[in-house]
Image: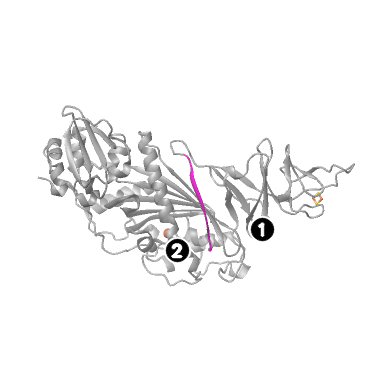
């Protein structure tokens, strides 16, 4: 490898090299990864194949060829290669030379990505990437970046807990569990995440992050916002382009919610937040050094354990093959949800009792670098929920104009419509225009946003006894119109200014 990274080769494993739509039936494309050209083609019937660039006949670059039927034809003398690399046609020769074939790459197409197996010794895959369940999840929203870094640095980010505050503005983070088994690694974290990246300032959310690594090339991060029951899944695939540069493929999905329109809005909000938040690491990755012997401190997360796990993906000379800090610890089974529940319970009963945030310390006994998993110090005070400020929803609407905050509205022009159902059914709308508001009983012919909910639930929500995001994500309420405007409601009509 280059001088920047002290690894003997690119890491072995499955790496994403594209999206299926990059290579249509009948197309040939040349991709450059692992410091070399890889020629991908898709036969007319749709079979995807990847081959080395050099034609075994007289060395032409096969990326200049074309697909005919089920074969890739070389641009030089028109030899025909099947998707398994075997030459099945030499148009001018009476006999095909025995063993004529080009080397193929192992490729897989699953969950909307193309994976290629890389091994510096050319050996066959030693593991497979499990297919993710797509039922109940939105379709893939994808992105790709090019960054001057190494795939191991990207995956290391998932266990580097102490960067989450400075770079991603996450509050307190606790490692709930770490599991390693062969090529698989899983880390479950709990964090207090600000709602700011999704335009919900001043809101702290209990978030569980379940990160699964299948080799260094696939990171699946499932986020559950416990406060609102929203679930998102981000996949990160770092792939070496050459010794200094990587491609990062990103795929984002969210768990479908009962309301399709609301799901689409939230999907868009989370995707945009992903696009804005993830690249915050890039300038650091591009300019940092990789330190083989970092000076770690308590609270850094299981970085040493991660690095020992990574060694299996390289072929180190024998003498250096043993991890410096002794053998890797045995895999520790985890029951993340149970641990999280226990942790939340413990926190609500005795917040300061266990700063590690785990209901047992079994993951905390690793000698050396990981002696202390997490202790980020005292927790920030949580925002206090409103307490029974409104005796009825009528009080809420009566005080709406008085509570209006023109500076939060800015130049907003909007009509907010409430349609509340049940025994205390009522309808109100508020027209915000030129920095002022007028609230009226009844329905507006063309509201910007409509909030539908039972009057009883709405009362619970405005009194802080029902989480608004949870109400809408579970179908207890319904929003029509821009969710971002609904998220602004508390700033437009602060509850503190009530009665
Ligand atoms: S170089 Fe490819 S067919 Fe001759
Ligand atoms: Fe990061």
Residue 10 location, quadrant: bottom right
- Residue at the front extreme, as displayed: 434
Q: Classify mark 2: helix, strand or loop.
A: helix
Assess whether mark 2 and mark 1 are in contact (beta carbons under 8 angstroms): no
Reply yes or no: does residue 146 show up in magenta. yes
Between the C-alphas of marks 1 and 2, the distance is 31 Å
Q: Residue at x 22, y 49 (%)?
A: 491
Left or right of 453? Residue 76 is right
Q: Classify mark 1: helix, strand or loop.
A: strand
Left or right of 456? Residue 161 is right
Asked whether residue 452 appears in the rendered view, the answer is yes
Closer to us: mark 1 or mark 2?
Answer: 1
Upstream in the sequence, badge 1 or badge 2? Answer: 1
Q: Residue at x 32, y 60 (%)?
A: 356
Circle 1 is placed at which residue position? 36
- Residue at the top extreme, as displayed: 423
Q: Which mark is residue 303?
A: 2
Residue 63 rendering spot, x and y as whole percentages: 71, 50
Left or right of 398? Residue 226 is right
Residue 173 rendering spot, x and y as whole percentages: 34, 58
Q: Nearer the viewer, residue 109 or 412?
A: 412
316 vs 466: above or below: below
Prevailing SS of the magenta stretch: strand
Left or right of 288? Residue 407 is left
User: Is the CB of the residue bearing disc 1 within 8 angstroms of ligand 1?
Assistant: no
456 vs 116: above or below: above
Q: Which residues are magenta?
A: 139-148
Residue 243 rendering spot, x and y as whole percentages: 60, 64
Q: Nearer the viewer, residue 37 or 165?
A: 37
Query: Where, quadrant-wise, is the C terminus in this rendering?
Result: top left
Reply yes or no: does residue 257 show up in magenta. no
Asked whether residue 386 appears in the rendered view, the answer is no
């Amino acid at each position: 490898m280059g001088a920047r990274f002290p690894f003997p080769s690119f890491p072995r494993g499955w790496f994403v090299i594209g999206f299926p739509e990059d290579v249509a039936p009948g197309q040939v494309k040349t991709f450059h990864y692992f410091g070399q050209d890889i020629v991908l083609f898709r036969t007319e019937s749709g079979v995807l194949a990847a081959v080395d660039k050099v034609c075994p006949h007289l060395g032409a670059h096969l990326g200049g060829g074309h697909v005919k039927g089920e074969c890739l034809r070389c641009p030089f003398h028109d030899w025909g290669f099947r998707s398994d690399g075997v030459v099945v046609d030499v148009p001018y020769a009476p006999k095909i030379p025995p063993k004529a074939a080009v080397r193929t790459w192992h490729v897989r197409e699953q969950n909307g990505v193309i994976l290629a197996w890389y091994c510096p010794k050319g050996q066959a895959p030693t593991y497979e990437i499990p297919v993710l369940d797509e039922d109940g999840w939105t379709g893939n929203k994808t992105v790709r970046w090019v960054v001057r870094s190494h795939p191991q640095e990207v995956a290391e980010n998932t266990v580097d807990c102490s960067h989450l505050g400075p770079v991603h503005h996450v509050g307190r983070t606790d490692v709930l569990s770490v599991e390693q088994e062969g090529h698989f690694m899983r880390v479950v974290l709990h964090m207090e995440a600000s709602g700011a990246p999704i335009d919900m300032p001043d809101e702290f959310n209990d978030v569980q992050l379940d990160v699964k690594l299948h080799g260094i090339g696939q990171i699946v991060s499932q986020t559950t916002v416990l406060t609102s029951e929203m679930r998102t899944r981000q996949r990160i695939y770092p792939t070496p382009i050459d010794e200094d540069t990587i491609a990062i493929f990103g795929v984002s999905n969210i768990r479908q919610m009962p309301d399709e329109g609301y799901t689409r809005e939230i999907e868009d909000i989370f995707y945009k937040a992903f696009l804005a938040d993830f690249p915050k690491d890039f300038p650091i990755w591009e300019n940092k050094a990789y330190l083989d012997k970092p000076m770690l401190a308590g609270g850094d997360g299981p970085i040493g354990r991660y690095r020992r796990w990574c060694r299996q993906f390289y072929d180190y000379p024998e003498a250096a093959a043993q991890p410096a800090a002794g053998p890797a610890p045995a895999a520790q089974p985890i029951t993340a949800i149970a641990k999280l529940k226990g942790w939340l319970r413990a926190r609500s009963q005795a917040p300061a009792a266990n700063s590690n945030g785990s209901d047992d310390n079994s993951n905390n006994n690793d000698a050396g670098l990981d002696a202390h998993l997490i202790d980020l110090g005292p927790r920030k005070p949580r925002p206090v929920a409103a307490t029974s400020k409104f005796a009825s929803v009528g009080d809420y609407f009566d005080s709406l104009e008085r509570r209006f905050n023109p500076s939060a509205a800015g130049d907003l022009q909007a009509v907010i419509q409430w349609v509340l159902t049940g025994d205390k059914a009522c309808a109100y709308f508020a027209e915000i225009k030129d920095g002022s508001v007028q609230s009226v009983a009844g329905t507006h012919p063309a509201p910007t946003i409509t909030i539908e909910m039972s009057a009883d639930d709405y009362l619970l929500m405005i009194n802080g006894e029902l989480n608004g995001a949870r109400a809408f994500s579970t179908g207890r309420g319904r929003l029509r119109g821009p969710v971002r405007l609904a998220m602004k409601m508390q700033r437009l009509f602060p509850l503190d200014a009530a009665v």
